[in-house]
Image (cartoon, rainbow, N blue to C red):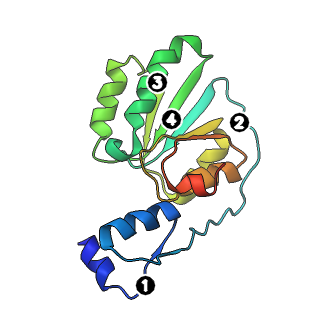
Amino acid sequence: TISRICREASHIAAVSQSLAKGLEKVSGQRGISVIPNIIDFGDSSLEESNNEKIQIAIVADLVDGIKNISGVLKALANVKNRLPSFSLQIVGEGPDSDTLKELTGKLGLDQVVEFLGRKDHSEVMAFLPTIDFLVTNSHSETFSIVTAEAISCGKPVIVTRCGGPEEWFR
């Protein structure tokens, strides 16, 4: 288990203070180092999208208990009639894919939500410049590389207080 592995390790490093605190709780280890993720921004583009609709994006594993994608869907359902024309593109796969697709239909969002499936890193980096903004609505994140990548593309982000991003995104 994680706690046993941590107790037996001579040193532990985490990508954020949030993760370090969680590992300290689980393992009883103190003095966990924090080494943030390294992000290769490559040829990050600062171009504006030229979409007719506002393009909202989520890039995440579809694990709703952690990523809270259903929360975004419910929020959009509550305000969809007060928003200009928009679409939500969800990049990712996971155990809650079918449940989230079903919820999309129940909320009457079929015409504005598109599930794009999993994309590799180069595809995500090509996708980010085409959106208007990214939503990271997680209950818990240790860093959120995709949030940093969206910012590197000049895109606004909406991010919850979920741990890791709070250390570098203010």
Q: Residues within 10 Å of mark 3 (few under 14, many from 20)?
A: few
In the displayed structure, 156 sits above or below 4; it is: above
- Residue 17: percent from left, percent from top: 51, 64
Q: Earlier in the sequence, mark 4 or mark 1?
A: 1
Dot 1 or dot 3: first in sequence order is 1
* 105 versus 161 height, above or below: above
Residue receiving disc 4? 89
Q: Measure the C-alpha gap from mark 4 to mark 1.
A: 40 Å
- Residue 56 against residue 152 in the figure, above or below: above
Q: In 3D space, how far apart are the residues under numbered discs 4 and 2 (Cα atoms)? A: 14 Å
Q: CA distance from mark 3 to mark 2?
A: 23 Å
The part of the image, by quadrant, that contains residue 25 is: bottom left
Who is closer to the viewer here, 74 or 25? Answer: 25
Residue type at tag 2 = Ser
Label annotation for residue 75: 3
Q: Nearer the viewer, mark 3 or mark 4?
A: 3
Q: Give the SS element for disc 1.
A: loop
Measuring 74% from the left and 51% from the top, which residue is drawn there? Answer: 45
Cβ atoms at labels 1 and 3 below 8 Å apart: no
Residue 15 left/right relative to 149: left
Mark 1 = which residue?
11
What's under tag 4, amino acid-wise? Gln
User: Judging from the image, what secondary structure is the residue with disc 2 in?
Assistant: loop
- Which residue corresponds to mark 2? 49
In the visual, does 98 lie left or right of 44? left
Q: Earlier in the sequence, mark 3 or mark 4?
A: 3
Q: Residue at x 32, y 43 (%)?
A: 65
Residue 120, position as x, y percentages in the image: 49, 57
Which residue occupies 67% across, 49% down? 151
